[in-house]
Amino acid sequence: MKWKKAALIGLAAVMAASLVACGAKEGEGSGESTKLKYTDIKLGETGTDIKTEIKVLNNRTDLLKDDYAGKPWSSYIEEFNKEYPNITVNIEGVTDYAEDSLLRLQGGDWGDIMMIPEVDKSDLPTYFLSYGSLEDVSKEANYIKKWSFDDEVYGIPSTAVGRGIVYNKKVFEQAGIAELPATPEEFMADLKAIKEKTQAIPLYTNYFAGWTMGAWDDYVGSTATGDETYMNQILLHTKAPFKDPGDGTHAYNVYKILYDAVQNGYTEDDYTTTDWESSKGMINNGTIGCMVLGSWAYSQMQQAGENADDIGYMPFPITVDGKRYSQADSDYNFAINIDTGAKKQEASMIFVKWMAEKSGFSYNEGGLPINAGNTAFPEVYQSFMDNNIVFLEDELAVKGEEDLKNTLNADSELMIAAGGNTKIQALIEHAANKDMSFDAIMEEWNQKWAGAQEANGVEAE
């Protein structure tokens, strides 16, 4: 679901040249941006006299269908228009959003609101309107650090997700699993039990879809380390981040779960035949035991068949010093076009705030609360509450290193938590073919990371 940063680097020069050549559109750009900030908006009061039309470029094409099993876009817009009848909202869905959205951003024809693709943080002020300072906006919205830069906020989350595993409760019952696993060893034992005692595929990789592979990267930060500074600060200066720490934690043990599951035959018989859309119904009807995906997948799996009550979401099986954690961060974020003109910007900001505060979108999609002060957690997180899981939001990179992870990712070609799907697919291939040991793969990744650090003059320990 995320842009492949190596491809992004290839576009950078073109995008920069395009901006120099074209600049802001006359009458729409600098000088005519709204002075309104996120915290200035009082829904139902601010902008009730605005009459305009806005376009939202979005990744959720499934919500464009009125027969969507959850709540479709048409319902949200209908409710929004009860308060703001003169703001017309048009949703444009993009199937391959991660890649196509960047091309649209380059061309400038994307509309008024878009979900932020994988751009460098330093480019945020070039394309998007600031919602206000990090300090101010954080008083009203959660999980906004991801798309902030230089103390300004450029993205408001559509939803926020915890990190765990979606699973079929009935399959786990049939396998005799009484307690959810807390360590890689326990999880592997559970997969073995499912293989031996049920007809279900214990762990479905969804190899063929590609983007689903990137989910594994999302667990190597605070989920596997218990440290919210790890992903954006410590990792950048760690000499060998893929070495075995010897205690069942960190990236080594996240990826080893997948490798061991494939090598032991606890995944589908032929990884090349996996199918994303079919997998939803398969886990709903008990053909699949579990899949490693963010909490956003929970509602989709529930809605894929008649067995919604059988779908559960459990914490990732890594314990750090007796405690368990879940990285909690924003999914795609709403950003406003800096060149769209003051009236459309105001209407756009009103719509974004309405989505965060009144729509219930994040809750409906199994997400964490976006509106600050809201403590209503959806049922997807029941097992997290039962097991005292601590949610951690990644801290920002230190000043001056905001784009360093992107650079190291591109130079190492590992793309950690930035669309590194191919490395995970390769790991599955090696595990299935038994032609490269897991430790050899991790050593190769360590060398690539160290090479990128050396090339960029990064001190590593």
Image (cartoon, rainbow, N blue to C red):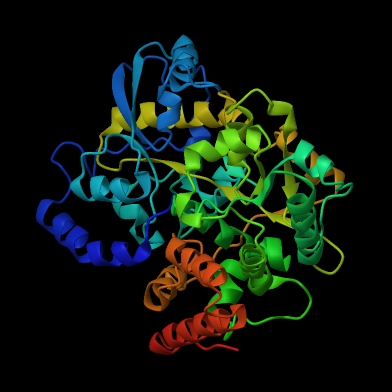
Residue located farthest toward the right when viewing the structure as drawn: 178
* Residue shown at the point (55%, 85%) measured from the top left: 443
| Image quadrant assignment for residue 302 | top right
Residue nearest the observer in this picture, 366 or 113:
366
Q: Is residue 370 visible?
A: no
Residue 320, compared with residue 330, is above or below; it is: below
Number of numbered callouts drawn:
0
Residue 309 higher or lower than 223, as above or below: above
Q: x%, y% of residue 440?
A: 56, 84
- Placement of the C terminus among the 4 image quadrants: bottom right
387 shown above or below 377: below
Query: In the rendering, at what x and y percent does residue 389 appear?
Result: 80, 51
Q: Position of residue 441 (x, y in %)?
A: 54, 79
- Place of residue 387 in the rendered image (x, y in percent of width and height, measured from the top left): 85, 49
Judge from the rendering whether residue 301 lies leftward or rightward of residue 388; answer left or right: left
Q: Is residue 414 left or right of residue 359?
A: left
Residue 327 visible from this viewpoint: yes
Residue at point 62%, 63% (across, down): 258
Q: Horizontally, is 139 left or right of 385 in the view?
A: left
Front residue (pair 355, 24):
355
Nearer the observer, 22 or 390: 390
Residue for point 45% across, 64% down: 420
